[in-house]
Image (tube, rainbow, N blue to C red):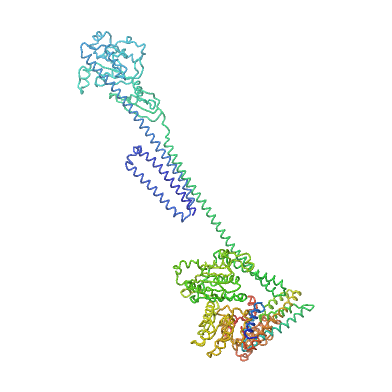
Amino acid sequence: MRLLHVFGFGLKVGHLLWMLCCWVASMVSMNWFINGEFKAAKASLLGASGNKMWFKFWDKISSHSFKIHHEYYQYVGSKRFSKAWWRKLLPSWLIGWVLASVVIFCCMSSQAAEKRKETLASMCDERARMLQDQFNVSMNHIQAISILISTFHHGKNPSAIDQSTFARYAERTAFERPLTSGVAYAVRVLHSEREQFEKQRGWSIKRMDTLEQNPVHKDDYNPDLLESSPVQEEYAPVIFAQDIVSHVVSIDMLSGKEDSKNVLRARKSGKGVLTSPFRLLKTNRLGVILTFAVYKRDLPSNATPNERIKATNGYLGGVFDIESLVEKLLQQLASKQTILVNVLDTTNRSYPISMYGSNASDDGLEHVSHLNFGDPFRKHEMRCRFKQKPPWPWLAITTSIGILVIASLVGHIFHATVNRIAKVEDDCNKMMELKRQAEAADVAKSQFLATVSHEIRTPMNGVLGMLHMLMDTDLDVTQLDYVRTAQASGKALVALINEVLDQAKIESGKLELEEVQFDLRAVLDDVLSLFSGKSQDKGVELAVYISDQVPEMLIGDPGRFRQIIINLMGNSIKFTQKGHILVTVHLVEEVDSIEVETESSSKNTLSGFPVADRRQSWKGFRTFSQEGSMHPFSDSINLIVSVEDTGEGIPLEAQSRVFTPFMQVGPSISRTHGGTGIGLSISKCLVNLMKGEIGFVSIPKIGSTFTFTAVFTSSFSSSKKYKSQKINNQSNFVSTEFHGMRALVMDPRPVRAKVAKYHIQRLGIHVEIVSKWKQGLSIISKGGSAKNMVLIEQEVWDKDLRGSAHFLDNLDKINRGTPKLFLLSNSIRSSGANNTSGVRNLTIIPKPLRASMLAASLQRAMGVENKGNAYNGELPRASLQNLLIGRKILIVDDNNVNLKVAAGALKKYGADVVTAARGIEAIELLTPPHQFDACFMDIQMPEMDGFEATRRIREIEQDINNRIHFGELSVEAYNNVSNCHVAILAMTADVIQATQEECIRCGMDGYVSKPFEAEQLYREVSRFFQ
Amino acid sequence: MDLVQLQRQLVDYRTSLYHEGFLDEQFTQLQELQDENNPDFVVEVVSLFFQDSERLLNELSKALEQQIIDFKRMDAHVHQLKGSSSSIGAQRVQKLCIVFRNYCEARNVEGCLKCLQQVKHEYALVKTKLESMFQLEQQISNAGGSIPV
């Protein structure tokens, strides 16, 4: 799951960067919107909806990315990431963004170029307009001068103006015509008037042609050198001129080609007319001449050209110095340095005449503005260029590079994330592998432990066996002690190994509880018998009490339950030297009643010794703290089991670590008592497996009480078929024998009496309890029904011998079917010295009480009818009797004792037994015709062993069968047996498979183990006798 | 001696025999075979065992005294002894016989001699024990009491 986190983190970072990227992109585009340039470029496409569309697109992207973000969890959760996919995605991502940044760069740089063009256009237009305006102002003024001349020169006679007046006036008003370098007036003189005019002026009219052809410098310009004008229809000699251009006075304007064209056009149109640019006389700068016609009278605006020609009086011309004019203008605008301006006369399209500016045009970017100087015939235009080359589009460059960097960063992050994921996946796989290895190692360890333990156990059995045999040899006291110690150690080792195996199993969780049906009481009887020897040796009273409420049959694991009980009882036995050990089993529901009982009998215990209060031992149990939820299922049975002893108890400081494995109270404990200290820990585990709890209370010098709970299933309510564990159900069958009998138990101690009552009741006997002799007598004599038996606690008997004698005497007097007397004795040996003189009919029942033992004792003493039925394996025994009764059986064994025993056993079942000591005898006896139904033959015999004998018998039988078959012998001679085959069973002590096979091979019908086991005997015999 | 005490003594004694490993459950089975029809079955079988064993032990002693020891024969004898001792449940004798047979198979004279001594010892022990037990039983039945199981 780490992987998921890492990937999630990576994705989040990626998402963040993506957002950033998009934000940058949107900012850039927003700038476009705001500047309006974008709109200008694509106004028709996007219009007002451009913004909206962009936002919609953005929403889509972000929602999509969220979707990816969301889906990824599901995706990753289910599948592994394809690395190849990412590897392919990364270059395409990078290429995509490189393209995108190139596009952005192009867009932005074109924007910039556009803007530059716009700037140029606006600047150019502005300059053109200003030039035009100034030109127009100058032109208007020249027109004003023309009006002045028509008014004061032509309107007055004689003229009010002469050359000097005009020159002075023009000079003084020159500031109003900043563009003109000079003005001159030429008057119209017809040829007829020439002479008079020349006379009047004192100079002749001169022609201009040469002047034009040979441009002369100002210094050596001399009008006198000019030749006079040739004869023409009319003339236009200059009469007035500004001082600057005074040299043109007397020159005929019509004689100049250019000027005459101008003059003629001017008088025809009535408007200002411009010449093409030409180098000015003297200044040698480029200029144009503006010519106005001066008419005699006011003409209507729609006058025809002829009328105009006729009305013409003279012509006013102004020289415009375009070059200086434009320069002045640019200086005024103070931006001369940023743009280059060219002014051209483009009247003739193919040969534009430059009026201003250099021709160094290398830049492609140029703007052309048209100039209107008021002369429709002439066309002028202004061409503007930037002086500097266009600057680098830094904004576009940085933006696109920035986007590229961000994209590659995002790519890198993705790449790193993918790599990281791959690495983490690899690590995870590695970890999984390691985990698998570790688990395998753990399994191997467990297996090793199991194997080794098993391997140790096998030779240990040999060691123990040999030690046992060594003990039987002739040893002196020291040697015997050594051997005993060795054996004890060996046993301890085996026990330890078993426990370690258990612990290992529990730790590895391999221990599973069985679910079989079992009889709790039988299990406890079993355990009791296990400890009865030890308890008798120690003189400790052992007792089991199971509440009536506990059902007969339970479903659970009897083996493990037994193990817990054995662990607890084993501990108790180990540490108890006197007093008692009491095991009680109740239902958890009964706890309240137990508590009451315990309270009332705190001193009244089984053996009279004080015990630790067992209520304390289950104080911490959860089961009781949450009473309500105790029984969620009706068919579960909660048992509470207490093992109470009067031992030395557990020291307070050691009580906390009682359930820790391999922890013992002190190092001396294992020396004095043996054991490994693992038992209680295993018990705790087992109890936990049984969904129970275990607890204890212990008071040093007084005793300990261990209590545990366990949950079993009731066998009644469960419809499931559980295989019933094979246990000896002694109590079940004996219960019928004594059913309905009545017994009297005489015991002053209620707890002990209760235990006795419990066991006797299990046999179906009705029990009454009395504590005193008198009471007992009165019950026997007066009670409604006769008592079949009286069971007297040994303590009562020993304490009051006189009382007992009295009791016996009185008992004889009551003639109501004298009850049998039984003494419940704690230990046979300890009571050896007690006086029980003169008592007939007194049977001792040794404790601990358990149903089978009790039943056996009662049977013997009461002479209960069904003899021989009281033992285990009753069924085969009875059936055997049925099968074998009256059968003639031959037993062959070289060993007299064996022979005798086997014969005795078979006779007991009613068989007619013949014995033979040797194989040869057997052959003789079994040669047909004979009366034997079966033969049990020992295998190992001297002279002729069982196999050989059998083989020979079979040969003889075969021979006879053949002869009967072929009619050589009559069937009647062989008891009408057409095919004689006597059943021969091997008797053998070893039951190895090889021996069995050997038996079958040489013609035997089966085998029985020696000494006989009823069940096996029945199984084999029943195959032949029906 | 009163009867109850005798009975107790018998039970104690018998228990001790089982405890000390002189007898095993085979002897119990033997006792079970005894009934009204065959009241002295156990005594009979056991005395048969005594006779048989004594004969075998003598044979074995003799065989071991020979110059050339017939181990095969000895093995057969020991096998017999083993069989009979297991039949009456004299398990200590029986177990020794197993060891004895191993020595016979290995033709180990010294081992055989040692084993024979041990077997003799064990046999004597079990014989005395059984005899004293029978005596006790005799006393009880003479006193008119039943023999406890």
Question: Which x, y percent locates residue A833?
Answer: 64, 81
Give whichever of A459, A656 is nearer the camera. A656
- Which quadrant, please, contains the C terminus of chain A? bottom right
Question: Which x, y percent locates residue A152?
Answer: 22, 14
Q: Is residue A236 above or below residue A369?
A: above
Asked where in the image residue A528 lies, by quadrant, the reply is bottom right
Is residue A67 visible in the rendered image? The answer is: yes
Question: Which x, y percent locates residue B25?
Answer: 63, 79
Question: Which x, y percent locates residue A21?
Answer: 42, 43
Give whichever of A325, A610 is nearer the camera. A610
Q: Outermost residue toward the bottom? A: A972
Identify the residue shown where x is 47% and y is 68%.
A624
Give whichever of A356, A167 is nearer the camera. A167
Task: Please indicate whether residue A302 sits to the left or right of residue A102 in the image.
Answer: left
Q: Is residue B99 above or below residue A78?
A: below
Q: Outermost residue toward the right? A: B67
Q: Is residue A612 above or below residue A18?
A: below
Q: Is residue A743 above or below residue A422?
A: below
Task: Please indicate whether residue A743 sits to the left or right of residue A207 in the image.
Answer: right
Give whichever of A549, A842 is nearer the camera. A842
Give the total number of marks visible in the rendering.
Answer: 0
Is residue A352 visible in the rendered image? The answer is: no
Asked where in the image residue A328 lies, by quadrant, the reply is top left
